Image (cartoon, rainbow, N blue to C red):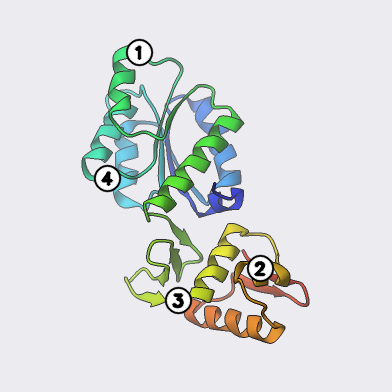
């Protein structure tokens, strides 16, 4: 099961033509995930999808000339893995049958309840991880690729990590925004690490990151990725 803090690694495309519902749900998403693209129709949704890195798509099923179902079908022509959620006040039987063919992670009803939203975010992160698709943006310089187990940069450069560096980085990402104390590092790394050894490990990660301003140390307590 994904960690709640891992939602901050997600870039979510949300399409809804109901202004009030879109604004409410967008504000909720912005408190939870890293980036939200909120649009009013299917045409705009496709444009955003084609020009940005999107990890998850939430679509109102009925929207003007290009419905959420249409958008989902177009996305699925070239991408059969990205998590897609369909939202509707009610779903006609035929539309439901069509939606079932699109390998959705879920369909949910309006208005979107908080618990339902959290559930689909958990499902999305778990699916992305299982399919090696999740890339966590650390800053404007570097991201972490869960599949490659490496740092990646916008120009395509890949920086490999050692086993301990991978485990430490994924631990920090799983608890992003929280301090990870020294003892937890030792437990996760499956070895007793001296303060000096852990410090050297973090120094190596910082060097490979290039821009390490997001990785902070709280003296005698632990480290935090912000």
Q: CA distance from mark 3 to mark 2?
A: 19 Å
Task: Name the residue furthest front.
Answer: 191
Q: Residue 137, how many percent across, how many down?
A: 47, 61
Please report contact status of discs 2 and 1: CB closer than 8 Å, yes or no: no
Please report contact status of discs 3 and 2: CB closer than 8 Å, yes or no: no
Task: Name the residue furthest right.
Answer: 220
Per the image, the residue denoted by label 4 is: 79
Residue 224 sits in quarter: bottom right
Label 4 environment density (alpha carbons within 10 Å; few <14, some 14–19, many ≥20)? few
Q: Residue 211, how many percent across, how many down?
A: 52, 76
Per the image, the residue denoted by label 3 is: 161
Q: Residue at x 49, y 76 (%)?
A: 209
Q: CA distance from mark 4 to mark 2?
A: 38 Å
Name the mark on residue 187. 2
- Quarter of the image containing the C terminus? bottom right
Q: Residue at x 29, y 14 (%)?
A: 94
Label 1 environment density (alpha carbons within 10 Å; few <14, some 14–19, many ≥20)? few
Question: Left or right: where does residue 86 sit relative to residue 194?
Answer: left
Along the polypeptide, which appears first: circle 4 or circle 3? Answer: 4
Label 2 environment density (alpha carbons within 10 Å; few <14, some 14–19, many ≥20)? few
Along the polypeptide, which appears first: circle 1 or circle 4? Answer: 4
């Amino acid at each position: 099961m994904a960690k709640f803090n891992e939602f901050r690694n997600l870039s979510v495309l949300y399409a809804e033509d109901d202004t009030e519902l879109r604004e409410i749900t967008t504000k909720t998403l912005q408190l939870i995930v890293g980036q939200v693209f909120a649009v009013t129709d299917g045409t705009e949704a496709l444009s955003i999808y084609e020009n940005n890195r999107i990890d998850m798509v939430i679509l109102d099923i009925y929207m003007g000339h290009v419905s959420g179902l249409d958008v989902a079908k177009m996305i699925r022509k070239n991408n059969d893995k990205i998590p897609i959620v369909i939202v509707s006040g009610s779903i006609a039987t035929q539309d439901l049958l069509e939606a079932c063919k699109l390998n959705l992670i879920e369909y949910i009803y309006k208005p979107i309840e908080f618990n339902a939203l959290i559930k689909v975010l958990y499902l999305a992160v778990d699916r992305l991880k299982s399919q090696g698709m999740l890339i966590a943006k650390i800053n404007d310089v570097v991201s972490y690729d869960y599949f490659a187990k490496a740092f990646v940069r916008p120009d395509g450069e890949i920086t490999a990590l050692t086993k301990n560096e991978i485990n430490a980085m994924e631990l920090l990402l799983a608890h992003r925004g929280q301090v990870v104390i020294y003892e937890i590092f030792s437990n996760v790394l499956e070895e007793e690490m001296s303060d000096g050894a852990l410090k050297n490990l973090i120094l190596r990660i910082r060097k490979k990151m290039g821009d390490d301003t997001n990785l902070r140390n709280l003296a005698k307590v632990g480290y935090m990725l912000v």
